[in-house]
Amino acid sequence: QVQLVESGGGLVQAGGSLRLSCAASGGTFSLYVIAWFRQAPGKEREFVAGISGSADNTDYADSVKGQFTISRDNAKNTVYLEMNSLTPEDLDVYYCAARFSPMPSQIIKREYEYRYWGQGTRVTVSS
């Protein structure tokens, strides 16, 4: 059983930056693909970025490429999402999710493939 706890959300002005963290416990962290998803009010949850267990493979939604960076520190059991040049369109609840993936594979973007989820952290961008 893997537990995930997000942190780092908050209020930021348009054009600003935030770094979200996802701290994991309860499993062998390096065997899990970790992904970030986000959900705006009234919209479906969408994939943002994902990173393989060894951090040698990452993938991003087209809408955030060049703007967001995902990374991980397996020694700290933590994944990060660095978000730059934020706009009001980035206002969402951000969730991290874990998928057991002991073999190298592409980053899965379908949320139902992820078994473990955090409670979410809210990002608010003021214009």
Image: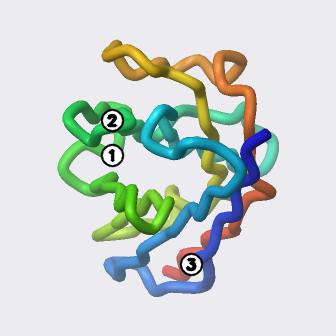
Name which residue type carries label 2: Tyr
Mark 1 crowd level (few <14, some 14–19, many ≥20, 10 Å Cα): some
The residue labelled by disc 1 is: 64
Q: Which mark is residue 60?
A: 2
User: In this picture, is 72 found above or below 110?
Assistant: below
Residue 12 position within the rendered picture, expressed as x and y whole percent measured from the top left: 50, 85
Name which residue type carries label 1: Val
Left or right: residue 53 versus residue 56 is right
Left or right: residue 117 versus residue 110 is right
Left or right: residue 121 versus residue 102 is right
Residue 19 position within the rendered picture, expressed as x and y whole percent measured from the top left: 42, 74
In which quarter of the view is residue 97 placed?
top right
Name which residue type carries label 3: Gly
The residue labelled by disc 3 is: 8
**Number of residue marks:** 3
In which quarter of the view is residue 17 placed?
bottom left
* Residue drawn at point x = 79 percent, y = 39 percent: 1
Q: Secondary structure at mark 1?
A: helix
Along the polypeptide, which appears first: circle 3 or circle 1?
A: 3
Q: Secondary structure at mark 3?
A: loop
* Residue drawn at point x = 25 percent, y = 56 percent: 67
Along the polypeptide, which appears first: circle 2 or circle 3?
A: 3
Whole-angstrom CA distance, mark 2 to mark 3, is: 20 Å
Whole-angstrom CA distance, mark 3 to mark 1, is: 18 Å
* Nearer the camera: disc 1 or disc 2: 2
